[in-house]
Image (tube, helix red, strand yellow):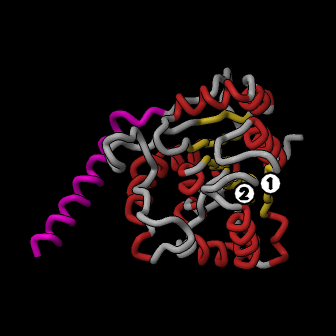
Amino acid sequence: LWAAMSGHLVAKVLLFALLLESVQAARRPRSRQSSSPRRVLVVLHPMNSEGERFRSNLQNITESAFESGLIEADVEVIYPDAPWGICPPELTRCWHVEPPRDFPQLPEDEEPVESIDATYHAVLEPLLWELQSTIGLENVIVAGYSQGATMASEMLRLAPWGLAGVAVVKGNVYAKSELWSSLKAQGANAPRMLLTAAKYDRVILVDDANRTAERMREQMGHSSAEKVTVHFDAEGDHYVSPGDIMVLQQWVLDVFNLH
């Protein structure tokens, strides 16, 4: 009984901390843009990073070409911060608690659903509602890298109401997540999807990315198979590369029909 009560109390404290973080300290670094954008790309950073730091990283490795190419096409880029306090103290920010064993052998009760949902409601849901009220979610893409990519994939379950696209750059898509039944229900109305993997990545295997893409196509129906794009880097590993980011840029422009 004491263990159950303690677990319930910890969950409440976690949720309160997330809500407090979203109100007081969840910065949303934005790309520099002089006028109100008509389209937005939301980029979710990896674990042990933060929005502004990841933005600087992407700017450095692409010599600013990633963001400048999107701004020229009237696409604003937003880099939200993941919350503090849900991962071990030596880490800075993360989107969800890391499960104890690697995908795809996770039992259902070890997939980090609770922390994913809490982060969504505290940080991403308010942002998406703001964008829905200003430009409409049909003009919004959510992308992420590594753990941020896993969080982005969960938007197929948590925010399936009209996003233009979801990009999973070298990230897990949990095998037992309800996003699969959500994709099946959406069918042809599902958002466009991008998955990337690299030959020498030992975290996200190419075979896993292939299986994920095929399962997505099966859930939506093969008539919608063209909605899923897969990119494989023949040289790269798990680190984000200029190639990954420029593939993402071109895919975003394609989804928004801006070529």
Mark 1: which amino acid? Answer: His
SS under mark 2? strand
Mark 1 sits on what residue?
231
Q: Could you say which is closer to the camera, residue 15 or residue 247? A: 247
Residue type at numbered disc 2? Leu
> Where is residue 146 shown, x and y percent of the image?
58, 50
Indicate whether 223 appears above or below 99: below
**For residue 123, side relative to residue 205 (left or right):** left
Q: Residue at x 82, y 70 (%)?
A: 225
| Secondary element at tag 1 | strand
Alpha carbons under labels 1 and 2: distance apart: 6 Å
Q: Which residue is mark 2?
A: 195
* Residue 182, position as x, y percentages in the image: 60, 73
Q: Position of residue 87 (x, y in %)?
A: 36, 49
At a point 65% along the width and 72% down the height, the residue shown is: 183
Q: Is residue 89 above or below residue 172?
A: above
Q: Is residue 2 magenta?
A: yes
Horizontally, is 67 left or right of 99 in the view? right
Range of residues picked out in magenta = 1-27
